[in-house]
Amino acid sequence: MEKLKVLVLSSDKTVRYKIKELLDAGDIVIVGYSDVSPIAAQKAQGLLPDVALICYESPSTFEIAQRIYQSVQGCAIVLISENLNLELAKEALNSGIRLLTSFEEGATAVLDTVRRAGALEQSRPGAKEASPGKTRVISIYSGKGGTGKTTLAVNLAAALAKQGKKAALIDLNLDYACAALYLDIQAKDTIAELAQERANLTMDVLRGFTVQHYSGLTVLAGPNTPDSGEYVEGRHVESVLSVMRPFFDCIFIDLPANFTDSTITALENSNQIYIVMQPDLASVRAAHLATTVLTSLQLREKVGYVYNKESKAFLSLKDVERVLGTKPQFILTRDDKLADRSMCIGRPIVLEEPRSLLGRQLKAMAAEVFEK
């Protein structure tokens, strides 16, 4: 049975975690979070949730709810508040809000309300016939360096761009960003400079900070120096993704090994998270630990594994499966010589050596990830 996709709208991180705990159920998956602001409608258009659970914060909450109601067909809106009253109920109904609930009612009542709202919307004739194409946000993560994480992110994004997809790559390695190096591009302005931008973030503003690769890929490069990465916070990542979603078919995020605020924000706003590993004990252990953290964040449903296999490895694939409790979704043939050459000349494997074994595997993975 397909899970009910819920978008949580709250400007308070404490409230977000509270809602996350209330929605901890096997038939529900939280697809993302957003502040209760105009940018929430853009995020809803990209994520296409079944239900938008919006926390009442001020009278402007109803305006945001109405924008989502008008722009995202097939999305039921539920209002959650500390205290419900008649005036709040009247305003909610006038804004297209389906049902109301409160924190006081507890997890069972909140879950029931969300489920009923989703069922009511899905049963409405033509509920999602007019829904636009869904933007895929895909995060590539590894808890250990040297697993091929950046190589994978760059090649998947470039492969889809070459196929004519509107693809983007965001480098969130704030200490040692190198995606631009892998693509042989120079980025004067990066996500660090964007984080310091004073103007309201729009796609026109954002374009001034991105670089266009010859494959058609749009790149938002990571900081040029480690110290400038300190300017980038989770709220910047959330704003960037919300603005970019309506303009791209897929957005790949190359993540660092640590779980910073910006990393967690990217993970929470991703449709899919791929953990990259190779057949050594440290790499597999890092993947297992990362899975534990993502499970605690209630993001386990989004996690998949990419395994860079080697012909002569101490750990077997069965050993890896035993540690993780599941099979890797993708198995790639590790080719250090090809990967190193690709990095040195600044040309992705899928463009420079598309007929190589690894090149074919990467292209096939890109196609499958996009359709998933």
Image: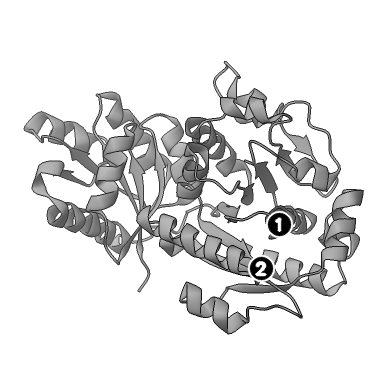
Residue type marked 1: Gly
Quadrant assignment, res 35: top left
The answer to whether residue 300 is visible is yes
Picture coordinates of residue 307 (x, y %)?
Answer: 64, 70
Q: Which mark, residue 278?
A: 2
Q: Is residue 71 above or below residue 303?
A: above
For the residues labelled 1 and 2, the Cα–Cα distance comes to: 9 Å
Q: Which of the image's four quarters has the N terminus?
A: bottom left
Q: Report the residue at 58% width, 49% height from top.
A: 257
Q: Is residue 214 left or right of residue 137?
A: right
The answer to whether mark 1 and mark 2 are in CB contact below 8 A is yes
Q: Estimate how packed mark 2 is, as few (under 14), some (14 to 19) or many (20 or more) residues with alpha carbons within 10 Å.
A: many
Q: Estimate how packed mark 1 is, as few (under 14), some (14 to 19) or many (20 or more) residues with alpha carbons within 10 Å.
A: few
The answer to whether residue 205 is visible is no
Residue type marked 2: Gln
Picture coordinates of residue 372 (x, y %)?
Answer: 56, 66
Q: Which mark, residue 146?
A: 1
Query: Which SS class for mark 1?
Result: loop
